[in-house]
Amino acid sequence: QVQLVESGGGLVQPGGSLRLSCVVSGMIFRANSMAWYRQAPGKQRELVASITSYGETIDYADSVKGRFTISRDNNRNTVYLQISSLKPADTAVYYCNTARGSSAWGQGTQVTVSS
């Protein structure tokens, strides 16, 4: 059974940074493109960044380009999201999943950007 365990969120001031991690089990991690998603209060979940199996292709939503960096460690079955220059609009619960969103969702990690 696939498990996705996100961590690293918190309360941060505007302009701050965080590094989110997602440990994946129950799938052949290196065979899957992975992605980070977020869901803000009252809004639909949106994809913010994706990375192919060995990192050869990386894509970002326009709203986070230049501020967020996705990476992965296939030896640790972990996908990361470095988030910088944070804005209040980045406040959301952040989730990881496959790039197709095909696995059961984890609990996510809350990122709150506020002064």
Image (cartoon, helix red, strand yellow):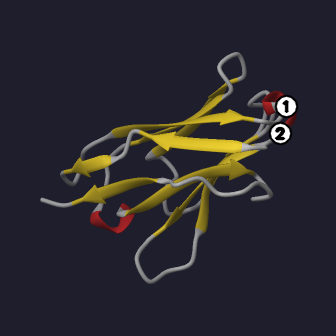
Kind of residue at badge 2: Asn
Q: Is residue 111 visible?
A: yes
Residue at 38% from the left image edge and 62% from the top image edge: 90
Q: Is residue 39 above or below residue 51?
A: below
Give the percent coordinates (x, y) of residue 19: 41, 36
Q: Say which of marks 2 and 1 sits in front.
A: 1
| Label annotation for residue 28 | 1
Amino acid type, label 1:
Ile
Local crowd size for mark 1, using a 10 Å CA cut-off: few (<14), some (14–19), many (≥20) = few
Residue 23 versus residue 101 in the image, above or below = above
Give x and y (percent) for residue 32: 83, 39
Residue at left 59%, top 68%?
A: 46
Q: Is residue 59 visible?
A: no
Badge 2 is on which residue?
A: 32
Question: Which sits in the foreground, 29 or 46?
Answer: 29
Q: How far from the left and from the top, in percent, is residue 9?
A: 36, 46
SS assignment at label 2: loop
The picture quadrant where one finds residue 3 is top right
Q: Specify few, some or many for label 2: CA neighbours under 10 Å numbering under 14, 14-19, or 20 or more.
A: some
- Quarter of the image that includes the N terminus: top right
Quarter of the view holding residue 110: bottom left
Given the current orientation, which residue lies at the most extreme top position? 75
Q: Are the two marked residues, 2 and 1, in contact with CB atoms closer than 8 angstroms?
A: yes
Q: For this rendering, which residue is in front, 35 or 6?
A: 6
**Along the line of sight, which residue is nearer the eye, 28 or 70?**
28
Determine the secondary structure under disc 1. loop
Calculate the distance from the C-alpha at mark 2 to the C-alpha at mark 1: 7 Å
